[in-house]
Amino acid sequence: MHMADALLTPAVAATMYVASGAVAGMSIHQLKKDDDPRKLPTMAVSAALVFAGQMINYTIPGTGSSGHMCGGMLLSALLGPQAGFLSMIVILAIQSLFFADGGLMALGANVWNMAFYGCFVGYYLIWRPIMRGGTNKAGQRTRIIVSSILGCVLTLQLGAFSVVLETSLSGITDLPLGAFCALMQPIHLAIGLVEGLITAAVLVFVYDSRPELLREVGAASGEGRRSLKATIAILAAVVLVVGGGLSLLASSNPDGLEWALFGNAEAGYSENMGLDEENFGVSSAAADKAGSIQEATSFLPDYAFSGSDSAAGTSVSGIVGSAMVAGAAVLICLGGGFFRKKHAQ
Amino acid sequence: MPLFSAYQRACPMNKMQKALRELGEMDDLAARQSPIHSLSPTAKLLTTIAYIAVVVSFGKYQLSGLIVMVLWPVLLFQISGIPVGLCFYKLRIVLPLVMAVGLFNPLFDRAPMLYLGSLPVSGGAFSMLTLMLKGVLCLMASFLLMATTPIDSLCASLRRLHVPGLLVTLLLLTYRYVGVMTEELAVMTDAYHLRAPGQRGIHVSAWGSFLGQLLLRSMDRAQELYGSMLLRGYHDHFHYALMKPFTVRDGAYAAGCIAAFLLLRLVPAARLLGSLFVR
């Protein structure tokens, strides 16, 4: 699910950096408030362990294939959501810088898609409510398994949907939003289930050996205590609503955002928000001027290119120029090789 | 010798050993000497970010505009003497998702945009090639940054750019421990596969204990690490011995490169160059 730089425009990448940066800022603030200097080495060692642990292949019985564990859920269960989130950031940064797994500019988006959902949504919506249900040892094991599976499935679904949304908003693919969702969500449902099982196995082992290492374990309190069945019922309802909503979007409206704003000829504009795509916006001298400035400086260029010869890339001179640039690149390479050889002599 | 061969047959280099080798190669490359290596990491970081931002800002049909951007990494590879082979080896990770997204474009965008003789080239084919080229160029830029900058220097420059100290220290510590953990897991994986020959991954019965045992040991190790940090005088943040100053030369390099990127973004250089020869 690691996104490459090529899949995002600068505007979307910057937005995701701001969002992830804000959550990172809040997490750092919280950790400073906690004032536990021992936490830093624990975070570093856990992050390194998760980084290496994600390379282990776990055999999935009866399939012949293998899966990996879910880092976000594991780290937030061990360190808490804030420390887990920061540890995930450095894991993703190292993966992107040294292994080209995810881009440098897409780091903000990758942090959001994998660390934010895994650590915050997984922890506050699933791990904590379920684990606070009771202190009975056998029950705790079941709670760890249930919360790991639910957490991994939900956070991977959210992450995959964010990838689809970010790529579509960047205008990178011609694949309609609905078809893209249909391609991504089911695959990540299966991955989420497997990752949930593997993560559960590791967490149950830790619980059996050193339960004090896990957050919220044995923290049942009178207030806010909820039974496992009630929690699962609430989560099932959330999943049904979210899943149902997404599938409607996927099946009937291939490009839901555009449809919602502009409608289509068959349905008529009165059936949705009633905006006319051609004449959308306010026409004024200031607006026209702003539009022309935006067109000249825009980092999100207009993709309505077909039939226009204004942009470089389609004319014969563009091809000839490109060939010359390629020639120049080859010459630089040859020149560099020549000078290095001379230098070596 | 025969024993070693038998061991190698039983345990071909596993994923973790390959990762360790890649990390080692990057460290070796970053320790070399060249005019690019001697630049301030801050200048290189800013230039790399600007380059990637400009590359991804090109429209999905602006292939010829994008091709000109190839010149910067090519020039840097030549000046720094970094071999391009390792960079292309990393493409195996970048390209699958980019291709998965881009390969659908020719199916949905079939309107011909250009005729090469009598062969029509659709808009989808253009956008697919543009997307792939963007992926390659961004990878080259990040690779060059890391291949010419040691991690300590990069972290020092992140501190200079006011990235929070906690995050930078965490990055540095994690990077150091990635090597240790990966090595330990590589040995564990080898040992496991020697005891379970022919098995592809970790059996379901060992799912929890395999990583769990290392996890428990690591938690204890973290406390020892903290103790050793305190003994070495650690207090809230690291001091960087290798912080290179940001000189006029670095400023000129960064300003010149960023100006050139913007110029190439705004001026269709390839088309102008071509129009000198073709009307």
Image (spheres, coloured by chain):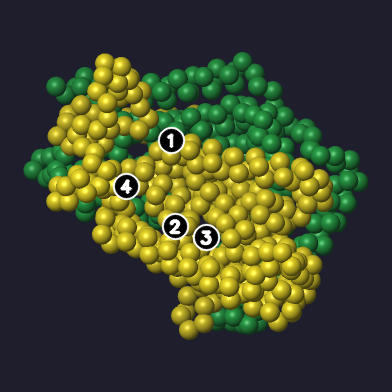
Chain colours: A yellow, B green
Q: Earlier in the sequence, mark 1 or mark 3?
A: 1
Label number found at residue A257:
4
Q: Nearer the viewer, residue A325 or A166?
A: A166
Instruction: Count residues near mark 3 (Cα–Cα under 10 Å), then give few for <14, some for 14-19, many for 20+.
Output: many
Q: Residue at x 43, y 35 (%)?
A: A10
Q: Earlier in the sequence, mark 1 or mark 4?
A: 1
Q: Earlier in the sequence, mark 2 or mark 1?
A: 1
Q: Chain of mark 2?
A: A
Q: Nearer the viewer, residue A278 or A79?
A: A278
In the image, taking residue A52 as reference, residue A38 lies left or right, namely: right
Q: Chain of mark 4?
A: A
Rounded to the nearest whole Å, what is the CA distance between mark 2 and mark 3?
Answer: 9 Å
Q: Residue at x 58, y 76 (%)?
A: A229
Q: Secondary structure at mark 3?
A: helix
Label number found at residue A94:
none
Q: Secondary structure at mark 2?
A: helix
Q: Residue at x 18, y 37 (%)?
A: A306
Reading the image, the residue beneath label 1 is: A10
Q: Earlier in the sequence, mark 2 or mark 3?
A: 3
* The image quarter in which residue A198 lies: bottom right
Q: Chain of mark 3?
A: A
Q: Residue furthest left?
A: B118
**Mark 1: amino acid:** Pro
Q: Residue at x 48, y 64 (%)?
A: A238
**Residue B195 to residue B157: above or below:** below
